[in-house]
Amino acid sequence: MLKSGIVVSSMTFLSRILGLVRDVVVANFLGAGAAADVFFFANKIPNFLRRLFAEGAFAQAFVPVLTEVRAQDDPRVMQDFVAKVSGTLGAIVFITAILGVIFSPVLAAIFGGGWFVDYVNDGDKADNFVLASQMLKITFPYIFFISLAGLVGAVLNTLNQFAVAAFTPVLLNVSIIVCALFLGPMLDTPAFALAWGVFFGGIVQLGFQLPFLYRAGLLKRPRWGWKDPNVTKVRTLMIPALFGVSVSQINLLLDTLIATFLDLTGSISWLYYSDRLLEFPLGLFGIAIATVILPTLSRNHVGKDANAFKNNLDWALKIICLLGIPAAVALVLIAEPLLMVIFQRGEFSVNDARMASYSLMAYGSGLLSFMLIKIFAPAFYSRQDTKTPVKYGIITMVANMVLNLILAIPFGYVGLAMATALSGTLNALLLYIRLHRTGVYQVEMATLLFICKVACSSIAMALLLMYLNAKIDWAQLALLNRIIELLMLIGSAVLLYSLCLLFCGIRPKELLVKK
C-alpha cells in the first residue's frame, strides 16, 4: 500500500502542479472579477456531479462489488459486469448531460440565486446570470466523459494499476491551459475559452484511459444492465452514497449559492482560489491514500480478515496525520504568501491575494478533518455499508447550512469557509465514533502516541513559521524574491519538522502496515 500510495501521490502531485499552473493562467487571464466568478460557478456544477457519478459515490459503491466479482476468478463474469455497468452508467449520465444543457438557465437560477434576482430586477449582476446560463451549456457535457473515465479508473485501481487514473487529471489541466492561451484571444468573451477547455478535457481524459482498459481485457461493448444482480447491488449501494460521500461538495455548492447574494464582487473567486490551494494537499495526501485504501479494505472484508482491516485503516490514519497536520498548520500560517506567489499577477491583485488568504485560513483549519473523512468513509463503503455515512452526511449538511447562515452575516465569504471546515470536522468525528462503537476500528494507544509526536513537531514548526514570516514584507518584494523567500520558509519548516519527528522517536518503519 505504501508503494501504491507513493505512485498515486506522485501522479497526483504532477496533476496538482499543472492544476496550479492552470489556475495561475486563469488568475492572470480573469483575475477575481465578474467573469472569473461566472466561470468558476459554471465549472463547479458539473464538477459536483463528477464527484457523484465518477470519483465519489459511484466509485465507493462499484469498487467493493467489483472486488467480489473479481474474487470469483472468472474473466467472463468480470467482463460482463464491466460492460453492463458502463452501459447503464453511460446512458444515465448521457441523459443527465443533455438535460443539463437544455435546462442550464434553470440551473443557473437555482445555484446562482443572487444573480437571477438581479436579472429579474435588472440589477448590477444581471449579466452574470446570462453568461452563466450560456457557459453551462459548454461545461455540462463534461459530466458524460468524466463519469466514464471515472469508471475506467475505478476498474484499473481494482487491478492495482493506480498510476493511469491518477495521471488522467493532468490532461484536463493541459486542455484548459491550451484553450486559455490559444483560443481565448480569439473570442469576444475569453472566459468561454476556459469552458471549452473543460469540454475537450473530458474527451481527452476518457480517450487516454481506454487503451489501458483494452490491455486489461475489459474493454467490451457497453450494454444496458439495470436489472443485473451485480449492477443492482451497485445501484443499491450508490443511491445513499450519492449523498453521503458528497457532503463536502454539496456544502461548497451552498457556499456558492450564498456567495451570489453577497455584495462583494469576487467572493466566489476568492473562495475558489483558496479552495484550490486546499485541494493541493487534500488530493496529494488524502485522496491518494483513500484511492489505495478502498480496494485493500474491500479485499480484507471479502476475505473476512478483521485484523488486517484494522491494521490497514490504522496505517492510513498515521499517514494522514503525519502529512495532514503540518500541511494544515502551513496553510493557515502562510496563506497570504502562498497566494501572492502563486496567483498575484495580471488581473489578480494584492488585495485579491489578501482577501483569498482569509478564506484559505478558514478552509485550512478543516484540512485534517477533510482528510480523515477520506479514510473513514471507505471503511464503511468497503463493508458495503452506505447508510451510515448518509445519516451522518445529512446531519453534517444541516449543520453546515445553519452555520452558513450564522457565520455569513458577520464574516461574509470567510464565514462560508469557516462553516465548511466546522461541518467537515463534525462529519469526521461522527464517522470515527461509529467505527469505534461498533468495534470495527479504534485508535490504539501506540497510534495516539504517534499522533501526539506529530502534533508536537507541528507546533515547533508553527513557531518557526510565525517567527520567519513576521520578518518578511511580502508586498514589497519582486516575484523572484518572493519565490526564493517562500521556498526558504517552507524548506526551513520541513527541515525542522523532520528533525523534531526524529527527536521524538518516529522512524520510517512506523510507516509500514503492522502484520
Image (tube, rainbow, N blue to C red):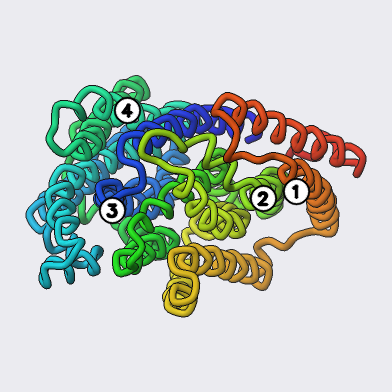
Element type where label 3 sits in the image: helix
Q: Nearer the viewer, mark 3 or mark 1?
A: 1
The answer to whether the residue labelled 2 contacts the one labelled 3, judged by CB atoms less than 8 Å apart, is: no
User: CA separation, marks 4 and 1?
Assistant: 35 Å
Residue at 43%, 55% (x, y): give it: 271
Residue 169 visible in this rendered orientation of the protein: no
Residue topped by disc 1: 466
Amino acid identity at mark 1 = Met
Residue topped by disc 2: 333
Element type where label 4 sits in the image: helix
Q: Nearer the viewer, mark 4 or mark 1?
A: 1
Labels 1 and 2: the sequence-earlier one: 2
Picture coordinates of residue 213 (x, y %)? 33, 26
User: CA separation, marks 3 and 4?
Assistant: 18 Å
Labels 3 and 1: the sequence-earlier one: 3
Labels 4 and 1: the sequence-earlier one: 4
Q: Is residue 378 above or below residue 394?
A: above
- For the C terminus, which image quadrant? top right
Residue topped by disc 3: 41
Labels 2 and 3: the sequence-earlier one: 3
Viewer-closest of 428 and 114? 114
1 displayed left or right of 206: right
511 displayed left or right of 116: right
User: CA separation, marks 4 and 2?
Assistant: 30 Å
The answer to whether the residue labelled 1 contacts the one labelled 2, judged by CB atoms less than 8 Å apart, is: yes
Labels 4 and 2: the sequence-earlier one: 4
Picture coordinates of residue 430 (x, y %)? 59, 71
Amino acid identity at mark 2 = Leu
The answer to whether the residue labelled 4 contacts the one labelled 2, judged by CB atoms less than 8 Å apart, is: no
Q: Is residue 395 above or below residue 229?
A: below
Viewer-closest of 308 and 174? 174
Residue topped by disc 4: 177
